[in-house]
Image: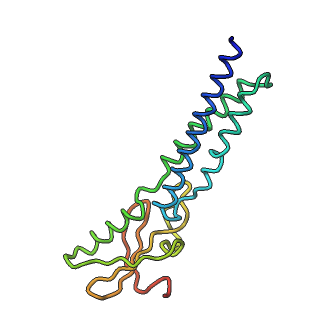
Amino acid sequence: MTRLKNQQIKKIIFSLVILLTLIIIYWGYRVYIEYRGVYNIVVFIPLLFLPISYRMILKDHEIFLRWRIVTVMILSIALPLLIYFTLPKYTYNEGQKRVIEYLNTTEKVEFINYSRGEDTIPVMNNPKGFLIKDRTYYYHVKVLDKDRYFMVNPIMGKVGELPNAYWHD
């Protein structure tokens, strides 16, 4: 009876780990979409191996079982916290709002959409956060039929106007 109960508990734990992994995959996708390439999402990769790690731990008669459990539990908690606390302050859409505030106009502001990879530009001297790439958000804006180009720092939200387009159409 005890062995059957242990097997059921292991199945429940493993199902919860699978659910947690699916949530992490969704979260990684959201970070990729919302931060448009300024955040290094490679840090999500170890979290994708959680089911395998827990599966190995839940096997019977493992050597150093406690040590493995502690290690995997720490990674399961520490990596998501690391990701959460190192995300840039501003998403791409929040950067658009910063540009609108910067323009301080009542006129219609039209954002020209770029493909992924062209909605950020490389920068030097970027106040770098942990896991944040040397890139800044890039916007092409039309105001009163005039083209204007902006960049927004994802960490500080600082808006800068560029004299010319970075990406040529």
> Hey, which residue is sitting farthest top in the picture?
1
Rendering coords of residue 91 (x, y %): 42, 60
What residue is at 40 percent from the left and 61 percent from the top? 156
Q: Residue at x 24, y 78 (%)?
A: 108
| Figure quadrant of the N terminus | top right
| 110 lies left or right of 168 | left
160 versus 66 height, above or below: below
> Residue 125: image x %, image y %?
51, 69
Quarter occupied by residue 68: top right
Residue 29: image x %, image y %? 53, 55
Please name whichever residue, 6 or 68, is drawn nearer the observer in this view of the structure: 6
User: Residue at horizontal 38%, vertical 74%?
Assistant: 160
Residue closest to the eye, 58 or 43: 58
Q: How is this picture coloured?
A: rainbow
Count of labels shown?
0
With respect to residue 146, does 47 lie above or below?
above
Residue plotted at (52% across, 42% down): 81
Question: Where is residue 51 drawn, in percent x and y?
Answer: 66, 39
Q: Which residue lies furthest to the left in this view?
A: 106
